[in-house]
Image (cartoon, rainbow, N blue to C red):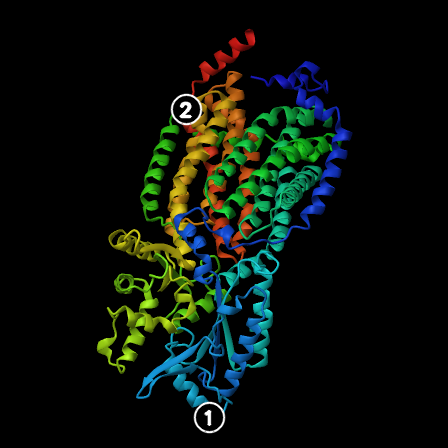
Amino acid sequence: MSDPTQDQGERGHLPAAAEPMIERLIFKNRIPNLIFFLITTLFLGYNAIKMEPDASFERLIPLKHPYIVNMIEHRDDLGNLGNFVRIAVSNKNGDIFDKEFMQTLQEITDEVFYLNGVDRSGLRSLWTSNVRWQEVTEQGFQGGTVIPDTYDGSASSLDDLRDNVLRSGEIGALVGDDFRSAIVFAPLYEQDPDTGEALDYGAFSQALERDIRQQYEEKNPNIEIHIVGFAKLVGDLIEGIKSVAIFALITITLTTIFLYWYSRCIAGTLIPVLTSIVAVFWQLGLLRLLGYGLDPYSVLVPFLVFAIGISHGVQVVNAMAIEAGRGFKPLMSAKLAFRALYIPGIVALVSDAFGFLTLLFIEIDVIRDLAVAAGLGVAVIIVTNLVLHPVIMSYIGITKGGINHVQNHDGSADRKWRLLSNFANPKVAPISIAIAVLGLGAGLYMAQGLEVGDLDEGAPELRPDSQYNLDNRFMVENYSQSADVMVIMVTTPPETCTHYPVLRAMDTLQWRLQNTAGVESTVSLVNVTKIVTRALSEGNWKWYDISRNQTIINATIRSAPSGLINTDCSLTPMMAYLEDHRADTLRRVVAEVEDFAAEYNQEGQFEFLLASGNAGVEAATNEVIGTAKNMMLFFVYSVVFVLCLISFRSVRSVLCIILPLGLTSVLCEALMSQAGIGIKVATLPVIALGVGIGVDYGIYMFSKLERFLKMGYPLQEAYFETLRTTGKAVAFTGMTLALGVFTWMLSPIKFQADMGFLLTFMFLWNMVGAIWLMPALAHYLLDPEKIAAKEKAKNAN
């Protein structure tokens, strides 16, 4: 059965009535359109190159979660417990009681003091006046700064320093357990108190590397510096963004090579690459105009935009080559290609965009930024790759070599498509369905172990051998106060936070937490009052407890550090230092605190509230991610289902497209579980991106299949013709999309590598699903004779 358009092959044009209005607007105004694209590209390109890396503590956390609401409400009272850096200065060849080492530690303390963004009032080091020792003697209390007033670096003053450190209670906190290192603790402002501008984490991290680590390690080869904290982590992530330029170059180069191998046409290679790069410039320029920056998550979206642009450009090149092979000139080939592709192309891209926008339901700003960036990028592709691409190609056309290559249906090429068309054969289809069902069952079983949150020690955003994770490992091994801290806020009416019932309840919670797996130690006002009560009782350990006498309690907390009590004594924090911030560790600690709060909270007297500290923020994020995952999946599949239903007007047709995507989602979750990748801020968007982009294959394949079924072809023959005309383009699309994200796996940022790994799998498996499973589903869900009869009746009317 012949293609109706083939009869027009030598005429070079079609009747005007057959031209959609949008086609006439585009191709009858080609010069004005090209001028518009040129001016817009220059303007948006100028803005794109001015994009700056952007990362903010608040954009990475779920601001509406109760834990974060509590943290923000009491932020002024918590002394920036959730945002700090810890700088450990280690002596390679001895302990800290060394004149040269102490001189270096003093210089580093002074250097950190003047770093922009440091809350200087909260800075703590052996050299700061707020780090003190205290003891009880026959004459009463004695105490002072840890650094002796008479310190001069001599052997006797170093001995005094050693005594003071032992009496300070800072071993494991500011001094390493082995006395070979000491910490400079620097709380940070989220915003500059003078200018109100957000802290530049990238610049702050560079200052730490340049002015602290590099300068002092070069100055004193005997020391080694280790730096951890949220600001340093984000700074390292921003630094990792710089490698993206290399990946972009590799991606463009490999894509160009593969595209030429596919098309055998210079124009069919360079124009899709050009228009896809234009789409990236448009996207970045629009984002900057809308006030967005590039964070470590959304910086990968331009790769997706480029890959999606190439995938749709391939369809245009393929369609133009087929029409040119029928004798049409470049202009008419471009028109016919546009006419055949603009509806499925727009449906596919709109499905992509709306699929991405479902991420807006997740109340974490960095994910919402990614959704906006991806949605905007796909919207731009509708213009650049479905309009600009065919307009440019209407002047250039496909070379003869390209036409011959794409139109090669003889010999081995035909045999290949004939073999694959057996997926629609009545004997093969049941086998395919059975394999899919088995795969679904295996996937659901293996996905049971999928966790929400981080599954690795240290900073899972970075690779295990990164400088940050090596520094974090040093902290964990040498200090009892780890970098992972969960802060429980104890609120009371003003002037009552030190009352006995409050402290007794806090003591009970501390005991329960210290017996919870994953908790290294706890610190609160209770520790202070116990230590001082014992000291007031001649150091007798029998009195290491909370006194019931309020006067004694009041006396014991006079020397409490400012961070353990706010100004009106309405809040006191309890710090739980954790071994790590793995999902199961956080879950255990949160459950223990929530159970305790439900049992002990007394309205109007005291309440235990979660949570601050980096572990508290992580716990809140995990809860939001866990709740949002299924909701996001529901919305993304609902959007794709509705848009496909509008396009194909048949639930059965939509199921042929949607069900392979569902299988891919299940297998992706199984892969995550087996690979030890948790669902978190970085990986949750992968599910929406994989579904949103993966639907493109099904839409293009099914639109062609439906066209041949309407022409009266039997299912297997219709599928054979579908593969002949678009099968290679779909296969190449899958390879192109996978290539666009494959290079992410080389990133020094681990979550980018994880995203690249998962998206590569989803893009390739979605392609397999479209080619393998869709025709098997069509065998059971579609009636070719009914479809052909319906189309015939429609044409007769």
Q: Is residue 96 left or right of residue 743?
A: left
Q: Where is the C terminus found, in terms of image quarters? A: top right
What is the number of the mark on residue 779?
2
Q: Secondary structure at mark 1?
A: helix
| Disc 2 residue type (three-letter) | His
Marks 2 and 1, how far apart at CA: 89 Å
Question: Hey, which quadrant is residue 390 in on the image?
Answer: top right
Q: Is residue 93 above or below residue 299?
A: below
Q: Nearer the viewer, residue 269 or 583?
A: 583
Q: Is residue 519 above or below residue 778?
A: below
Crowding around mark 2 (Cα neighbors within 10 Å: few <14, some 14 to 19, many 20+) is many
| Disc 1 residue type (three-letter) | Ala
Mark 2 or mark 1: name the one nearer the start of the chain: 1
Question: Hey, which quadrant is residue 524 in on the image?
Answer: bottom left
Q: Is residue 202 left or right of residue 396?
A: left
Tag 1 residue? 155
Q: Is residue 627 above or below residue 638?
A: below
Q: Residue furthest top?
A: 797
Q: Residue furthest left?
A: 542
